[in-house]
Amino acid sequence: MNTYNPIYALLIFFAISFFGYLLFRPRKGWFWLIKNNLKSNEKIVIEDVLKQLYHSENSGKEVNVNSLTSALKFGDSIVVDAIKKMAINDLVQFDGDVLKLTNSGRDYALRIVRVHRLWEKYLAEKTGYDKTQWHEMAESKEHELSHEETNLLATKLGNPMYDPHGDPIPTNTGKIADVTGEFLSSLAVNAVGKIVHIEDEPDVIYKQILAENIHIGSQIRVVENNKKRVVFYAEGEEFKLAPIVAANITVAVLEKDEVIEENIVRLSSLKENEVAHILGISKESRGDNRRRLLDLGFVKGTEISIDLVSPMKNPIAYLVKGASIALRKDQASKILIKKD
């Protein structure tokens, strides 16, 4: 008995054809999507290796394959394969077991660093994302922009020289400004300076600094420095850090003939029945948040006092130019005052 059914055969033919179309259709077929995804992942691995080598070399650390695979989030075999291709393409070279960037590799690494720091600047100035999110978001975006798109982003931001952490942003020709200063952990007692850079890696130490609410641009005075802790005052508050954490903060030391700001404190320290005058807004307040504070009247010379304290003492309403304006503690900490 012949069971052949032309309708079933036709259905099978169309099913196979449709599956083949889904698999191999130009640019959007599953085959091409998987292939392009593999290429994209390979690009990310190579660029992360380059960036890791760049940061290590800049800090004077030697890197071998084992230390590199330990530092990156990819599987060991994936990193090793990427290094082989990078060596073939003259991006890296070996000096014994030490892996080093070639001139071409360093140029490529600088382009990735440039994109990353421009993205952090963009996130700080143009969005409402919290600073705890900037680094991770920039990590994911740094692999996406072309050279032309990167230059457009730089132009939109006014070609900044430094990112929000104080790291220099390489120019489109690879030039990079200096960060001058000393590590907070190495400063002598009674040294006075301004915080010019906060290192955002490793992440665990950076989060400790953020939790302490330490600000770029703050003037500090060291009052204690030993093997157990570094203690300093900034904007009317005392901070205590472990030396390993303090080593991630760079301070430009002020010379004796430079103006030392006295009696500057944060608005968050103002008590009820106290009156103060605004001296300015911290560099930590950027973009739309900074403009909003200025529009609300938080400008230099303005008298300010507490109008109303909420039951939980956060937020607090401040009296500014006859208006009562509520601020959270973290917002108030970015407004600098001098108490009368």
Image (tube, helix red, strand yellow):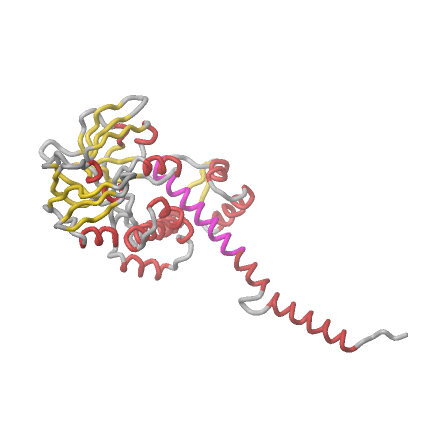
Residue ranking furthest to the right: 1
How many numbered marks appear? 0
Q: Which residues are magenta?
A: 38-60
Q: Is residue 61 above or below residue 163?
A: above
Residue 289, above or below 312: below
Q: Find the residue positioned furthest to the bottom.
A: 6
Is 12 within the magenta? no
User: Which quadrant of the view contains residue 252?
Assistant: top left
Front one among 208 and 180: 208
Main SS of the magenta segment?
helix
Residue at x-position 27% and y-position 32%: 183
Locate residue 165 relative to residue 302 in the image: left or right.
Answer: right
* Relative horizontal placement of residue 143, taking residue 311 as reference (left or right): right
Q: Residue furthest top?
A: 227
Quadrant in which the N terminus is drawn = bottom right
Q: Quadrant of the C terminus?
A: top left
Q: Residue at x 11, y 31 (%)?
A: 256
Instruction: Give the image quarter of residue 147.
Output: bottom left
Q: Residue at x 47, y 53 (%)?
A: 43
Q: Is residue 202 left or right of residue 14?
A: left
Q: Position of residue 13 (x, y in %)?
A: 71, 73
The x and y percentages for residue 325 are 20, 49
Using the image as rendered, state which of residue 267 and residue 250 is in the foreground. Answer: 267
Magenta stretch contains residue 52: yes
In x, y percent, where is residue 69? 50, 39
In terms of depth relative to the viewer, which is nearer, 1 or 110?
A: 1
Residue ranking furthest to the front: 311
> In the image, residue 233 lies at what x, y percent?
21, 30
